[in-house]
Amino acid sequence: MDTATIRTSVQIETPSELEVVNMSKRFGSLVALDHVSMKIKPGSFHALLGENGAGKSTLVKCIMGFYTATEGQILIDQQEKTIHSPRDAHQYGIGMVYQHFTSVPSMTVAENLVLSRFDSTNMINWNKEYEALTAFMKTSPFQVPLNLPIAQLAAGQKQKLEILKQLYLKSSILILDEPTSVLTPQEADEVLGLLREQVTDGKLSVLMISHKFREVMAFVDEITVLRKGKFAGNGLVKDLTISDMAEMMMGEKRQPQPVNKTTSTATTPVLEIKELQANKDNGLSAVKGVNLKINQGEIVGIAGISGNGQRELVEVLAGQRPATGGQMLVHGEVYQATRKEIAKHHVFALPEEPLRNACVPHMSVSENMALRTFDRPPQSKGFLLILQAIRQAAIGLIKQFSVKTPSPDTPISHLSGGNVQRAVLARELSADRIDLLIAANPCFGLDFAAVDFIHSAIIEARNRGVAVLLVSEDLDELLKLSDRIFVISDGQFVYESNIDEADFTTIGQRMAGH
Ligand SMILES: Nc1ncnc2c1ncn2[C@@H]1O[C@H](COP(=O)(O)OP(=O)(O)OP(=O)(O)O)[C@@H](O)[C@H]1O
């Protein structure tokens, strides 16, 4: 590395210009990035857009030094630089905030901040560090209590801390990978608004991967769009409409699809939950006696900030966590979510983080698509797996659900996040009969075309009579799809309403625990 031009943390005051020139990245025969160029002007808020699998994460991982680009250059203030690791990127003031939290839950905010430093040593003078941290907090755009353990922070605070960590490290070019996916709409606006102020003051450049046009229109100056690994366009947001951006992403004009709900009058309950209780991994109470009934052809939405018991509730229903009290009934029969009961009652689940919770990462796309069907004809005969039938079924599902994969034989972990989601959805929604569908944040990280597709699939299932439990951190999604909505806070339902009478502001307040 060219040490003469390295800007140490302390010296960085204004962001440098970051330019990517003709960058390509191949994974075997797959070209994930194909001669892409992009320029982030100093002090601008830039969004990187593209459909799932377009190459956005690959591009930012090449900038951060996680991947070595097959071809192309990175220029910092018009000088070519080599970035082999996030540590190298840090030297040029570039830092990244990931979708998932990277702080250590048992340690305090202060400890996490100090230990995130690339130059932290074994001997830490905590008094001095606290003084410096308190001074830093006074000038920072967000406030997070220094003495609190991470485990006690709400999701919004944790996300703010991830951004603060980068400001503390004096990153002046911030790369954000879908930073608002875990925030309420109000929190998202607050965080992006504060970053926007720093950008306007010329202290920061931001490169944000986003699928949310609303946020792009409200906070962003300029966009670069990728399509199938190639540069597909760029421009100033003030000169563009949402439909221009969508066209750049998809290569064709396309309007968002409205959802058409049929009127449902069915009152047959499919799922009944009575005084259900469950614990967190650490043995503390997570679900504190909840009651719920979902009828045929009804979508019940559960809103809540993550960490309020919804994950544990879904896991109990999906048979991944034991209940510690209460009762569940499906079709009026006691249900404990055993594999046998799940099959008998036609219960299907779209869990959060599908790669971790619903896939075997090193197995192929077709094997993962067969996880529910491999032990039945035509995919097996006695103990014999009929691989041709498994592959054939996968080819059909890949086409029907537009899963972008080099082949059915590719390990599922090589797919982009959105395409893993589509593959799991294809498996779960293609069953001949579904009575109960449990969906947890089914559109997390998906592009708008995929979101439309999944929303239509859920509505279609509901219109056919499927009972749907939809847990989501996206209020807009809940208000669009649900027939009834609940808010979960601290393991209890604190609000319930039919969707026609639901009040956005009250829901937001209940989510925040007021
Ligand atoms: N480590 C890897 N090995 C093989 N292929 C990969 C790897 N990482 C990404 N790819 C492939 O590169 C392409 C681009 O993926 P990438 O994750 O960059 O897309 P993305 O635009 O970030 O998508 P999403 O919005 O779904 O996160 C995809 O076809 C993906 O399958």
Image (cartoon, rainbow, N blue to C red):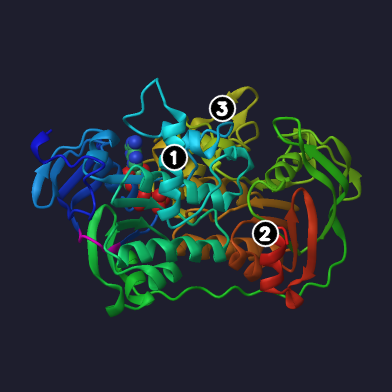
Q: Amino acid at mark 1?
A: Glu
Instruction: Give me the C-alpha separation between circle 3 and circle 1.
Output: 65 Å
**Which sits earlier in the primary sequence, circle 3 or circle 1?**
1
Please say if the residues under marks 2 and 1 sit with CB atoms less than 8 Å apart.
no
* 504 lies above or below 415: below
The secondary structure that dominates the magenta segment is: loop
**Which sits earlier in the primary sequence, circle 2 or circle 1?**
1
Q: Is residue 498 magenta?
A: no
Q: Quadrant of the C terminus?
A: bottom right
**Apparent side of residue 407 relative to residue 439 in the rendered image (left or right):** left
The circle drawn on residue 131 is 1
**Which sits earlier in the primary sequence, circle 2 or circle 3?**
3
> What's drawn in magenta, residue-wise?
40-45
Q: Return the residue at label 3.
A: 385
Estimate how packed mark 1 is, as few (under 14), some (14 to 19) or many (20 or more) residues with alpha carbons within 10 Å.
few
Q: Position of residue 183 (x, y in %)?
A: 55, 57
Q: Return the residue at label 2.
A: 512
